[in-house]
Image (cartoon, rainbow, N blue to C red):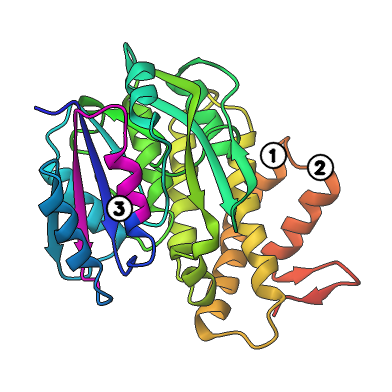
Amino acid sequence: MKTVSVIIPVYNKREYIGRCVSSLTAQSFSDFELILVDDGSTDGSGELCDGFAAADRRIRVIHRANGGVSSARNAGLALAEGQYVTFIDGDDYVPNGYLAALVAAAEGADVAVCDVVCVRDGREARRFACGKESLTAVEATELLLSRREINSGPCGKLFRRECIDGVLFPDMRVYEDILFVLAAFDRADTVRATRDTEYVYDVSTGGAMSAYAKHPNTDLITMAERVLDYLDTREGVFSPQPEYTTLSHLMQHLREIEGIKEKTPEQEALLRAICDFFYKKRRRIRKNKAFAFKERIVYLFAARGYRIKGGIKKIK
C-alpha cells in the first residue's frame, strides 16, 4: 500500500497537465500513487495522461465519459489505495517538497493543510495561510466557513483515509469542494497546518468558476443552504462569522450579476434565487451580529428584490 494517493481530474487540460504531473514526479517524497482521471477530454489530454503512465509506474489513468469534476474525483477515490488522499487540479502545481511536508504535518492528525497561493500571470494575488499549527476540527471549520486562513477546496490538504471513507463529492458543477471538506472536517478530531510548503492555484487559467459566471445555476444556493443547515445542527458552536460569510458570498454574486447589462436566462434565474434566499433567511440576517447596521438593511431590501444604492430601485 502506498502512503499517499494523489487524485487529479483532467478535462481538456492539455496546455497545463504536463506542468502539473511533472511537479509530482519530481517530489522528494516518492511513496505515492498518482491517479489521473481523464473526464472525457477532447483536446488530447487523455493521450498525454497515457504517456505519463507509460513513463512512471506510479501513475494510473482512468478514461471515462465526461461527468464533471465531482464524479471524476469520486472515481479516483474509488480506486485510491493510499493511507492518505490528496487532490490536485490539472492546471495547478506544487513544489517538490509538497508531499513530504504534508505527510510530516499529518502525523497524529486527521487532516493536514498548507498555504494555498493564488497566482495570476505568475504573480501572487492572494494567499491562504493558517496562523496556528494545530487546530481542533471546530477551529478549522470556523476558518474554512469564514474563508479565512484555510481555503475552501480539497486542494492544499492531505486527508487521512479513515477520515473520508464514505465521503463523496456532491453532484454539483461548483461549490462541491467546500461541502466535501466540511464533511471531512466534521469527521476529524485534529487538523494540522504547515507553512513548510504551498499549493499553487493558477487562477489565470480560468476553470469551473469562470464558466459558472457565464452560465450559473443554483449550486450556489444549494451550497449556502447546506452550510446553514450544518450550522443549525451545531448551534452555539461557531461564531456568527461563518453564517455571515456564507450570506455575503451570495451578495457578491448578486452584485456581479446585477451589473451585467445583457443577462442570460441563467443569470436572471440566479438573481431571483438569491433574493428569494435572502427573504427566506431574513430572520437570520436580522439576528446575525456580524452584520453592520447599514449592511443588514441592504440585505433586507435585497430580500424584497430592491437595492438602495443611489435610491431605492428594483433589482433587475
Q: What amino acid is found at the position of numbered circle 1 in the picture?
A: Lys
* Spot occupied by residue 12 in the image (x, y as percentages of width and height): 32, 70
Q: Left of 251 or right of it: where is 52? A: left
Judging by the rendered image, the residue that carries numbered circle 3 is 170
Tell me the element at label 2.
loop
Residue 28, by quadrant, is: top left
Which sits in the foreground, 117 or 58? 58
Say which label, 2 or 3, has the lower sequence index. 3
Residue drawn 43% across the image and 54% down it: 175
> How far apart, in angstroms, are the residues tagged by discs 1 and 2?
11 Å
Tell me the element at label 3.
loop
> How far apart, in angstroms, are the residues tagged by discs 2 and 3?
34 Å
Q: Assign the N terminus to one quadrant of the image.
A: top left
Q: What amino acid is found at the position of numbered circle 3 in the picture?
A: Pro
Q: What amino acid is found at the position of numbered circle 2 in the picture?
A: Ala
The numbered disc on residue 287 is: 1
Judging by the rendered image, the residue that carries numbered circle 2 is 292
Q: Left of 107 or right of it: where is 292? A: right
Check if residue 87 falls in the magenta segment: no
